[in-house]
Amino acid sequence: MYQLTDEKRLYDQARRLLTDSEVTDPGVAVSQLREVIAYADWKYYVQDDPALADEEYDKLFKKLKQLEDRHPELVTADSPTRRIASGLSERFPAVSHMVPMLSLDNTYNADDLRDWDERCRELASVEELEYCVEPKYDGASISLVYENGILTRGATRGDGIMGEDITNNIMQIKAIPLSAPFANLGIGQIEIRGEVVIHKKDFEEFNRQRIAGGLSPLANPRNAASGTLRILDPAEVRKRKLNAILYHISFYTTDSEKAAANAADLRATELDTHRHSLEWLYKMGLPTPARQMRLFRHIDEVIQFCNEFESQRDELPFEIDGLVIKVNSFALQDKMGMTSHHPRWAVAYKFRARQATSKLLKVEFQVGRTGAVTPVAKIEPVPIGGVTVGSISLFNEDVVREKDLRIGDTVLVERAGDVIPYIVKSFPELRDGSEQEIVFPENCPACGEKLEKQEDMAAWRCISSSCPVQLAERLMHFASKDAMDIRSLGTANVQKFFDLDLLKDIPGIYNMDWQKVRLLGGFGEKSIQNLTEAIENSKKQPLNRLIFGLGIRYVGETTAKTLASAVTNIRELYDWSVEKLLTLEDVGPKVANSVSHFFSLPENRHMIDHLGEAGVNLLNEQKSAVGADGALSGKTFLFTGTLSQFKRSDAEAIVEQKGGNILGSVSSKLNFLVVGTDAGSKLEKAKKLGTVTILTEDEFLSLTTQQ
Ligand code: IVH
């Protein structure tokens, strides 16, 4: 869809739109903005190669929305602003599919595939067939209709004949373009099929939120995708980060005579085989398996590929439950036809099941980082999809009650990809009377404190601030890969240092007594060096990782990013009210209350101060003063209090040398106030103004020495 020259032009166009503040011709501006946003969506969701920073994208989107609000006559059917649906869908009207949405026949092994290949070659009356092999996406089936190039309908599969019109929800999926250049090729109407999927990572976050909200988690990404498509609030659908892949054109019409001639050309060259059709859709800007699919001329090659691919299934970002093998030639597909259930020219090769039955032996209770006590089922170890499962989280008491689980029960276990294993259900009909009720503890299994249950929450919680397990868990979370990524610290070392009192709290990581560690034994000089280096490097981690690492309740990686990009310095969050937090995208009352509470507690402020003193980055570098070249151009500074690390005159010289200015007093013109000890009224005034970024000496140094 986009040639390299197009990409260059759109990229330049985006830069211009970002920097131009004046709009001379709103008509031109809206169409340029739309073009750039559609391009950015395509780069992000179809190519997986973002063209714009999130903030730049948001800025362009807001600009378009403002222009359209001012000039409603300029809104078009395919404007990306139409993705923000307002209000609730009342229900989903029934719609009939243009062509029935058939299912697929299944195969499970090489023999099944050989039989199928033989039948195919017989039906097609050929010796050799070309097969296309592509992933079988484990999501929710959809059909899309584009009319004159505009997406006009999105529907669920339903019973294959009638589905539900979920157009508003489909429009929340940014991988699906709202328009595509079909009309230029003379195609009036086209119906395309595909699958809505949810990435495993997003699915896990989705379940975390369900658990936090007291709901039981869903078993697999497929249920999450199909459930989300049927939510009545499109804004909620938008938050769930759905993705889509399209793999089949079921129908298209041509309108004019000229178009018919075009279409004949199309049929001869682009729509002659399955492979070409997916490449063609891909060129039209739609997400297809064009890059994943493989072509083979012999079933033995197909079988070999199926075996190889099965071992890689966990590496994909989303769940697949097999591969689909399709006869490549459309002419032969037509010749082979279909049954009432499935086409004869395609078959699914299903991977090994990821379910198994086992026995529930006992339930243990574990205390987590936030004090929540989680029941964990110990089952008779059983292999599922190549992994032996013996331990399964039961999340909370409600889940245990809802599923009517008892010790001694036979249970059905599912493991969806690298997603955590899950107990689907128990089999009450297999009980012999010896099964026992699961009893929840009243006291914290780690520190003995009485457990509490907050209203509306499913989890029992230990609220002791000195519960040792919680403290250790918090440290581990802070050091973990997605937080500060202090790799060599690891869970085992954290636990060891914690148990030996060498590490008591998060700032303690940056104040370890390495001499004592040496005396412990078991740590060579090399490993101590690795540890200290990893700790030192973590000081430079971006602010969102620090915020995530602090372990604020309900603040996952995404919310941490949102918070980080809203401030220049984490300390600004000390004074953010719940109302102000609620203005951030995707921050609801639960998150806002938790964040505001966290930053209001003196012990947390001290912790952050200690981290800052240790040299940990507390700044959002993108928003801070420094340009990519370290320039402070146009930024204003003022120093106050007693400075201990440098002379005021030297610091002022640095600012000026880098293009910044020194102001004489605190006013709305001031960007940065650098405070030493005993700062007085200037600091107060700056805080009151709320627009000034307050920096410690360390922060000033790290700001001005950035690359
Ligand atoms: S082709 C006539 N290709 O699997 C076209 N289906 O178990 C028939 N599915 O209902 C479908 N990935 O929802 C096709 N690459 C793929 C697929 C795929 C997933 C789904 C589809 C179908 C179901 C059958």
Image (spheres, rainbow, N blue to C red):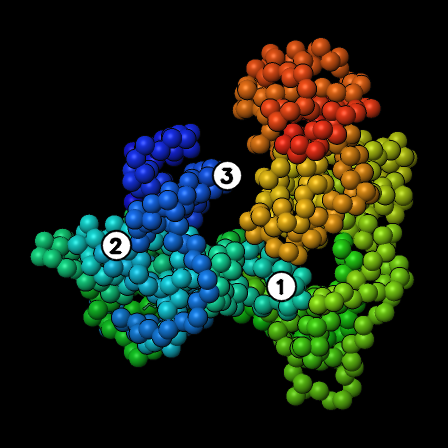
Residue indicated by mark 3? 55
Q: Position of residue 277 (x, y in %)?
A: 27, 56
Amino acid type, mark 2 = Gly
Give the total of numbered labels: 3
Q: Decide: is 439 above or below 185.
A: below
Quadrant of the displayed image that contains ligand 1: bottom left
Cα distance between the residues tagged 2 and 3: 29 Å
Q: With 617 as the anchor, is 473 left or right in this view?
A: right
Secondary structure of the residue carrying numbered label 1: helix
Residue indicated by mark 2? 149
Secondary structure of the residue carrying numbered label 3: helix
Q: Which of the two labelled residues, at mark 1 and mark 2, occupies the earlier sequence position?
A: 2
Residue at image location 57% in from the left, 15% down from the top:
659
Amino acid type, mark 3 = Glu
Figure quadrant of residue 644: top right
Q: Answer yes or no: is residue 425 visible.
A: yes
The label nearer to you, 2 versus 3, is 3
Cα distance between the residues tagged 3 and 1: 28 Å
Residue at image location 68% in from the left, 19% down from the top:
665
Residue at image location 65% in from the left, 29% down from the top:
692
Between 43 and 52, the one nearer to me in the picture: 52
Between 414 and 190, the one nearer to me in the picture: 190
